[in-house]
Amino acid sequence: MSPRTAPPWPLVALFTAGYLASYLLPTTVGRLDSGLPLSATEAGSIGSALLLSSATAGFLLAAHVRRIGPRRLARAGLLCAAAGYGTAALSHSIPVVVAGAVLGGFGSGTVTTVAATGIAAQPDPHRASTLGLLGVSALAGAVYLTVPHLGPGHGLPLAAIALTALLVWPATGRLTSDGPATEATLEGGRLPHPRSGLVLAVGILCWSLAQNSLWGVSGRIGLTQAHLTEVTVGAVFAVALGAGLLGVLGAGALGPRLGRAVPIGAGTALIAGCIAVSASATGLGTFATGEIAWNTLYPIVLSYLIGLAASLDGRGRWAVLVGSASSLGTAAGPLTGSVLSAQAGFPAMGAILAAGLLAIACPLTAVALRTGGRTPRPAPVRRGWGSSPLEGLGGGAPVVDVPDAYENVYASTSAR
């Protein structure tokens, strides 16, 4: 059975296992802070290390899935995830916890790479991605609602990720063990639209960093500043994840009606406002409003940014570079949020992030206007970074179809 004919449900299961760590980042970082002798900044650093390790796996393995074989690679990733997160959950030694988080993150990234590669090769990748979103959002919501009732400690969310990796193992039996001997490679040649591509890459790095700076400390905002219980914060996150699914559906329904510039520019400005509201929350109303509105808007804007990257080069090279830049921003987010909040407080952190988003909204919108006349088709997106398979996104004056090889690299390197 080839990757192109692999059944979708095993891929959906792998998608869920691979992305669960990034979806649970707020509670993971928050419990590291409260359950171990770590400062908020140190806990955020561990979260960043986990995401960076996951992104590194995508960079290293995206072009090798077919050669190694999806089954072998998925099983190796699940073993790394189970061993890493399980060890971190059971240990109270900070070096062991850090090493376990990094190993687990690499496993998550490996599993995500296999899932993204297989989903991009499906006859209907949009449907497969949507099912994956539904799976990981539902599971993460269940964890947010359940973990607060099981007691304190840093190990529970990590143990949930490790257990998920073990439960998904049987699904790998439906994957092929060997792939084609040859692999798609990026062709050489001059990159088109170099200035627009560079602006987009830098802009989306900052854009992803701002999103994940807030996401990495959202749990602490709810607990320490809004004075909510962990049960209430978990419920807000569960609802926010559901709102993100509405955002995914909204991006698909909106389609090309407004072009790219309006969703990117206006959407980024609205997200900046949501971040400021959430970071300055002092009660349930403002905290829930900011988090839920933000999670609704995030995937809509992200889908158009991905489409813009795909439109700049028919060979998909800008999509790869922009995806890599987004992954760097995603990995640096938790540490950045922790440092800013520790030095200036949550409201000031939100104001700084919002101002940064407003500043980069202008060049991002300019790039969208500069490449006008292209008809975008939003792709489904995933939390973690920045994250989405590119399926037939419009480009250039002619419509550009991005090859699967580049779809896979981009999809596998995005985090939130």
Image: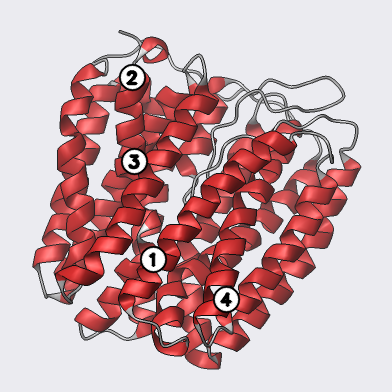
Residue underneath mark 1: 235
Vertical comparison of 228 with 387: above or below: below
Q: Earlier in the sequence, mark 1 or mark 4?
A: 1
View extreme (bottom): residue: 344
Q: Nearer the viewer, mark 3 or mark 4?
A: 4
Question: In the drawing, what numbered circle is on residue 67?
Answer: 2
Assess disc 3: are there few (<14), some (14-19) or many (≥20) residues with their C-alpha within 10 Å of its C-alpha. Answer: many
Q: Find disc 3 in the rendering and name its residue.
A: 16
Res 278 label: 4
Most extreme residue toward the front is 285
Residue 189 at x, y = what percent? 71, 26
What residue is rendered at 68% in x and 50% in y? 301
Using the image as rendered, state which of residue 167 and residue 120 is in the foreground.
167
Amino acid tagged 3: Thr
Spatial separation of the CA atoms under disc 3 and disc 2: 23 Å
Q: CA distance from mark 4 to mark 2?
A: 45 Å
Please report contact status of discs 4 and 2: CB closer than 8 Å, yes or no. no
The answer to which of marks 1 and 2 sits earlier in the sequence is 2
Alpha carbon separation for disc pair 3 and 4: 27 Å
Q: CA distance from mark 1 to mark 4?
A: 15 Å
Q: In terms of sequence position, does the residue under pointer 3 or pointer 1 come before the other?
A: 3
Position of residue 34 measured from the top left corner of the image (x, y, whole percent):
26, 82
Circle 2 — which element? helix
Q: Earlier in the sequence, mark 3 or mark 4?
A: 3
Do the CB atoms of the residues marked 3 and 4 lie less than 8 Å apart?
A: no
Q: Residue flagged by tag 2: what amino acid is it?
A: Arg
Query: Mark 3 or 2 closer to N-term?
Result: 3
The image quadrant that residue 182 belongs to is: top left
Q: Crowdedness of circle 2 by 10 Å Cα count: few (<14), some, many (20+)?
A: some
Residue in the picture at 37% in, 15% down: 3
Q: Earlier in the sequence, mark 4 or mark 2?
A: 2
